[in-house]
Amino acid sequence: MNITINHEKISERKTDSGENLLEIKNLKTYYPIKGGFFRRTLGHVKAVDNVSFEIKKGETFGLVGESGCGKSTTGRTILRLLDPTDGQIVFDGNDITNLTGAKLREARKDFQMVFQDPYASLNPMQMVGDIISEPIKNYYPRKKSKEIKTEVMDLLERVGLPSDAYYKYAHEFSGGQRQRIGIARALALKPKLIVADEPVSALDVSVQSQVLNLLKELQDDFDLTYLFIAHDLSVVKHMSDRIGVMYLGNLVEVADKHSIYDEPLHPYTQALISAIPEPDPDKKKERIVLQGDVPSPSNPPSGCPFHTRCPLAKEECSEIKPQLKEVKQNHRVACILYD
Ligand code: SF4
């Protein structure tokens, strides 16, 4: 996908505060596999398997990998839409891993989600004004209607929708406009973190850049931190400051975007990057074609999870599971080639 960057509006952002907004430590999310007459647990799908990373205040952390690699489950577990099986989620200095009830509800004000499918995530029969004001009314029941309406009108303007959108229904809008409504709803409670899960993959290519540029502009305006989940590597590159690459529930490489794209270290990342089309016909690059299918996360291979497809695998790769470790400054990789 070719992305047009709106340079006039997007200034160089400062993400070097060094302070973490989010810390994920050894996160595991397993789904039980039930079967038999008594619906006993027969095994587990290891959707997220011991994942650790951090996101600094104001930065965009991109999570990339093939579909089914666990990136969406990671995002939903962080938002506590799914319960983690193990590990720790620290948000803005507070451990939210096991929060429940009123404390979880209160914490949720600060982290919101932009969903993949704007067609499914909005009620087509609800007026746009009601969709966006709903979270405000839920969290601030004493707030005056007039004040809420002013806030919603302001949000409509900020996401590039006309003020009369307030009185229209979601089904009257195009996909791109609906995603703008979804973004306005996510911003209504002034969150600190937004998890954007494939936010443009359901949209026409012609409007994808507009929505991505809007997300970037809003990041500056609202002081937002993003966890940006996508399978499209050019979209992730455009949006992210740092990137984590996932394979079969595991994080296999983490680095700033330039290192990931210009100097990928993990053989899986190298294969992903080699598949990006090169726009300059004079520059030739060799494509690494991976053999075989991604194994099932209910029965992952022993040792390195990538060893069944890795073109550089050695004998010991089926026995030793490499841990993510720093091999260059701020560049972590899980591969025995760098031990
Ligand atoms: Fe390939 Fe072995 Fe490295 Fe895994 S540990 S990525 S199988 S070389």
Image (cartoon, rainbow, N blue to C red):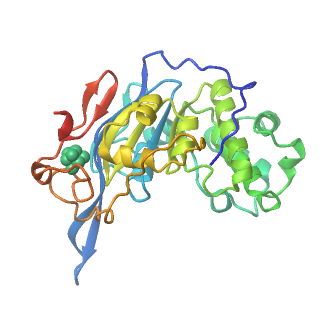
Please name whichever residue, 62 or 331, is drawn nearer the observer in this view of the structure.
Answer: 331
Q: Position of residue 168 (x, y in %)?
A: 85, 55
Farthest-out residue, bottom: 37
Asked whether, in this view, residue 1 is left or right of residue 164, the answer is: left
Asked whether, in this view, residue 50 is left or right of residue 317, the answer is: right
Q: Residue at x 46, y 29 (%)?
A: 258
Q: Residue at x 74, y 25 (%)?
A: 9
Inspect this view and state whether residue 89 appears.
Answer: no
Q: Residue at x 74, y 51 (%)?
A: 206
Q: Position of residue 127 (x, y in %)?
A: 79, 55
Q: Residue at x 43, y 18 (%)?
A: 19
Please name whichever residue, 185 or 287, is drawn nearer the observer in this view of the structure.
Answer: 287
Please name whichever residue, 136 or 253, is drawn nearer the observer in this view of the structure.
Answer: 253
Image mark count: 0
Residue 260 in the image: above or below residue 316: above
Q: Position of residue 104 (x, y in %)?
A: 44, 41
Inspect this view and state whether residue 60 appears.
Answer: yes
Q: Position of residue 111 (x, y in %)?
A: 52, 38
Asked whether, in this view, residue 112 is left or right of residue 258, the answer is: right
Q: Quadrant of residue 218?
A: top right
Farthest-out residue, front: 282
Residue 183 in the image: above or below residue 29: above
Farthest-out residue, right: 164
Q: Quadrant of the C terminus?
A: top left
